[in-house]
Image (spheres, coloured by chain):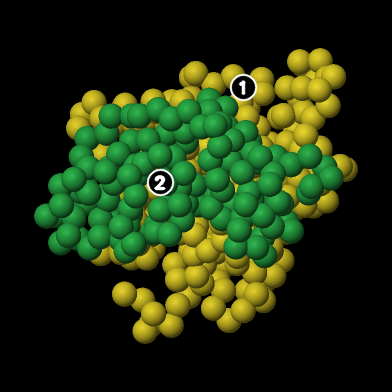
Amino acid sequence: MKVLTLNFLTCAVKACKSSSASFPLHPKDCELVSDTIKPDPRLIHNILPRVDWSALSTTALELGFPALPEQPPTKEQLEEDEKMMGELHTLLLETQISEGKLVCGNCGHEYAVKEGIANFLLPNHLV
Amino acid sequence: MLPTPSTDHVDFDRIYEPAEDSYLLLDALSSESEKAFLHERFGPSTPTPFVIEIGSGSGVVLSFIHAHSEIIFGRADILTAGVDVNIHACKATIQTVSVAEKEQDAPGLSHGFYLGNVSADLGTALNPGNVDVLVFNPPYVPTPDLPTLLQDGNLSSFDADSHLLSLSYAGGEDGMQVTNRLLDSLPELLSPDRGCAYILLCAQNKPEEVKDKIRKWGEAWKAETVSKSGKVGGWEKLQIVRIWRELPPSAIQ
């Protein structure tokens, strides 16, 4: 699953929905793989408004990526800053989590990721 | 007619095989009315739409949207993702998307950006307010019971496969028990400014009642049938309902 997916996922436990700690989930013991995607600045420009930047920053740090700036870069900033564009390209488009766990910051439940697929099915007592 | 993604690699003993319902959904999404709706709602100056299919099965519908995003949305840049309670379906969807992408790459055509598939119960793993287009071909067949989500590890592989297949069609009372759960979560899941959903229903799901229920969510909520299967007399009369919020003119970019 692309790292960007974490920006759209949350803990499946009902009780955690009301807690802000359940998003984003925290990667643990994750193996990353990299796809080779050709540069697509327009895609990056169009994705950025969709991204919860603070959640993405948290995810980037937790996965060992270089820290992201406080605010998302503007289109003009990206056009000038090739390094930032390259970093966003790697983080948002190319990097996948193939194995590992996603942990809820509220309840501690760990969701397993195997072969790139995260399993959010809950045991009966947590539904 | 846009090409249907190949699903030759999929094991249909344990994953729902594309059928009339799947093809009705493909036809609806690529119809003139829906292309017009989606082109307008997700115009090129707006952020990338996030499209999710709940119950992606073989991946045929998601891959179709993913491969033909330029035609369906008027833009190549869409984010796609799939959810399925069946892990084998998740794996199949990943493959089907990959095959469909290669079909587009070969002649230099575009496709969307696929995030992946997760195994989950409907929208429970999705952070609210993000989904721009939700597509759902539910388990819509009326059945006396609903199969459990987690299966017994002691089942023989034949029974395990049957169980997985039953999850793809068994809808309980009026065939609506699963669909109703998804519908109840729609107002929360969909993005507030432009989220919409395409849901497949059969005659026994009492589609008129379903649409009325949705319209009662609030003045802005709309539900209309955008496609119907031609079958007359067959008990499986199918239709695709589009659900959306009509925004006040000032809110639309």
Same chain assignment for discs 1 and 2: no
Q: Chain of mark 1?
A: B
Residue B141: x, y in percent? 74, 43
Q: Residue at coordinates 52% horizontally, 67% vertically from top-left?
A: B244
Where does label 2 land, which residue? A60
Q: Residue furthest left?
A: A80
Q: State how far apart marks 1 and 2 are (Cα).
A: 38 Å
Instruction: Judge whether residue A95 can be spotted in this image.
Output: yes
Q: Residue at coordinates 45% horizontally, 52% vertically from top-left?
A: A58
Is B51 placed above or below B62 here? below
The amino acid pointed to by label 2 is: Ala
The amino acid pointed to by label 1 is: Phe
Q: Which chain is green?
A: A
Q: Residue at coordinates 40% horizontally, 46% vertically from top-left?
A: A60
Q: How many marks?
A: 2
Horizontal relation, residue B95 to residue B199: left or right = left
Chain B colour as displayed: yellow
* Residue nearest the viewer, comparing A104 with B203: A104
Residue B37: x, y in percent? 39, 63
Residues at circles 1 and 2 in contact by the CB criterion of under 8 Å: no
Horizontal relation, residue A6 to residue B157: left or right = left
Is A3 placed above or below A29 here? below
Q: Chain of mark 2?
A: A
Q: Label 1 crowding class (10 Å Cα cut-off): few <14, some 14-19, many 20+?
A: some
The local secondary structure at tag 1 comes to: loop
Q: Quadrant of the C terminus of chain B?
A: bottom left
Q: Residue furthest right?
A: B144
Is B193 placed above or below B70 here? below
* Residue nearest the viewer, comparing B70 with B208: B70
Instruction: Judge whether residue B19 can be spotted in this image.
Output: no
Residue A56: x, y in percent? 42, 52
Q: Residue at coordinates 39% horizontally, 59% vertically from top-left?
A: A53
